[in-house]
Amino acid sequence: MKIGSIRHVRGFDVARPISIGVMLGIMLPLVLLPLLSIFVFGTSKGLGVFWSSLIAPDAVFALKLSMVTSFWATVFNVIFGLFGAYVLSRYDFWGRNAVIVTISLPTAIPTAVAGFALLLLWGKYGMIGKFLSEEHQIMFTPYAIILANIFVTFPLAFGVIKPVFDTMSRSLEEASATIGATRWQTFWHVTLPSLRGAIVSGALLTFARAVGEFGSTILVSGNLAGNTQTAPLYIYAKFNEGQIEAANAIAVVLALLSFVIFSVLFFARDWLEFEAQEA
Amino acid sequence: MNRRASFTTIKASLLLLALLGLITGSSCLPKSPSESGGTVNITVYGFSIMKESLEKAIYPGFVAKVKTEHGLDVRFTSSFAGSETITNQIIAGVKAQVAILSIERDAQRLRDHQDVTSDWHLLPQKGILNKTPFVILVRKGNPKGIHDFADLGKPGVRLIHPDPISSGGAMWSILAIYGSELVKSEKQSGEADRARALQTLQTVWRNVISTPGSAREARTQFESGYGDSLITYELDALLMKQGNPNVDAEVVIPEATILSEHPAVVIDRNVSATDRPFINAFMQYLWSEEAQRAFVKYHFRSSTSEALTQENKELATIKYPFTVDYFGGWDKAYPEIIESIFRDSAQKRK
């Protein structure tokens, strides 16, 4: 069989192993090996060092702070994502497209710029901040971290939920209205179940992105260990201090968390779509 | 549902539940240990190399002292970064109560911004907490043959140097390079040779391969194996060797070098009337014999007592030491040397 004439895929198709090999080969130095090196280095000095780095009070605090601030940012952005997607999908108004573009802007802005912008607005001499008293200052508190997370993950849940709204068949909603359901009842019992999958994947995406946020957090939080230092900030601080093992342990935790989140997103996708169709 | 879909559902639900448990279990902001009632909280922002001496010796010493004398618990919260960085953070509004800075100019900046209203010169030793000379770190065996600052300008030498924008240590280093040439030429010919000093600064700066944000970051980079050389605080070089005995580094003591002097100031803006007695007590403690001895153990030189400094046998003797007063203080040194000579002449690469 001539090698050059492989257009059909009867028999052995050499393009298959070559393509797979090339794909993995490209991924290896760019993605796979860096990820692997975190795990290899993290346990290279022995599990004892790894464990003691994990249970250090500042490390535990940093992880907890990351979880909590990301959680609340996710809650806010999913609720707004639902609301915004509903409004922008159902109603047409002058400037509608501009609003959709603006919602997507935060992902294009460098995160350091986002942090800087928040400081300019809420800082002691900021446009809003200067009207706040000393005790009610938002910057350099955990609330600033939540604000920054909301900003940088703003379009993620919205971007997942809106297409579902757009492609949703209105006939069910209209039917529900004709039999006397209120707007809220229609939303809760008819619209929302179809959005379940999008809400879950939007929430998981937002959460994963918020946990990993660094550029804006380092500017607005003040980076006080055991107070306003999130997990990525902790890793950065430990690395700069020369405590590579401590940084590595937390890096492993964050890497595992992202792995779990995206595994769920992947394995549950069938379930999410299936359930959506059933509803 | 077929069997495959139901298996996926179970897997997915379990994972989701685990995530949910993780999240909701911690949906309230974690209690910062310093917020527990009944304790006195002191927030200190220090420049990058202060971390070990403060956290391992000074804080525990002060906490023990207050506990035995007054029965109160003291909790310290700290943040460490380049001196310029922490000064900018304090100006931006972080709630620091005490700042330990690398250069006195940063204290002046805080005073100009009215974050510091009391005069730190009224503190012991005019507010200078401790000092250290600037030394050169090279690889073991000194393969590039570096014996003084001028040798760092030799072709092929790769120098790591912190960024003067964010690091106080970087500015000390520049003054050390420039000043050492002035002092040496003065000793040789009786007149300070500015042209030679500028030329040395230019050739050295041309060999800089990386400018990390703080002195400690620069040390970490060097320790990880990058570059041939590093100019840093003597104490950080000694701390590095102490923490990592097998590190590929050795210390070269220049003939003439600057002694950096580190001020400690109170950020009056963030100190309430109830905090004030504890902050004052802490400031007085910093110059006590106990604290100064602790600093010497961590390779600083004491600002109060030469005898205490002698207790540390690893500290080198500098042949021709000078301080920033040689240039007329930071008021003159900053605009004349850092800004016009370094920034405008040396830093601009061709």
Image: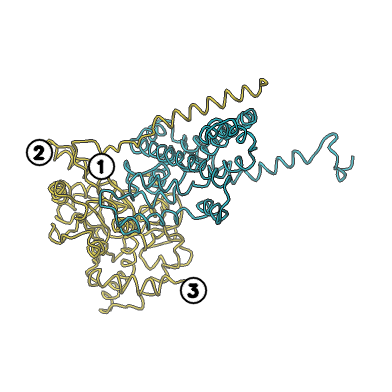
**Are the residues under marks 1 and 2 on the same chain?**
yes
Chain-order first, disc 1 or disc 3: 1
Numbered disc in front, either 1 or 2: 2
| N-term mark: 3 or 2 | 2
x then y, percent, for residue A44 = 47, 36
Query: B46 or A95: which is nearer to us?
Result: A95
- Chain letter for the residue marked with disc 2 in the picture: B
Give the residue pinned by disc 1.
B56
Residue B267 percent location from the top left of the image: 21, 55
Q: Are the residues under marks 1 and 3 on the same chain?
A: yes
- Vertical position of residue A103 compared to residue A247: above or below: below
Q: Residue at 35%, 54% (x, y): give it.
A: A122
Dot 1: element:
helix
Find disc 3 in the rendering and name its residue: B350
Q: Quadrant of residue A9?
A: top right
Q: Where does the image place residue B76, in percent across and percent down from the top left?
A: 24, 43
Amino acid residing under circle 1:
Lys
Q: Earlier in the sequence, mark 1 or mark 2?
A: 1
* Disc marking residue B284: none
The crowding category of the residue bearing disc 3, from other C-alpha atoms within 10 Å (few below 14, some 14 to 19, many at least 20), is few
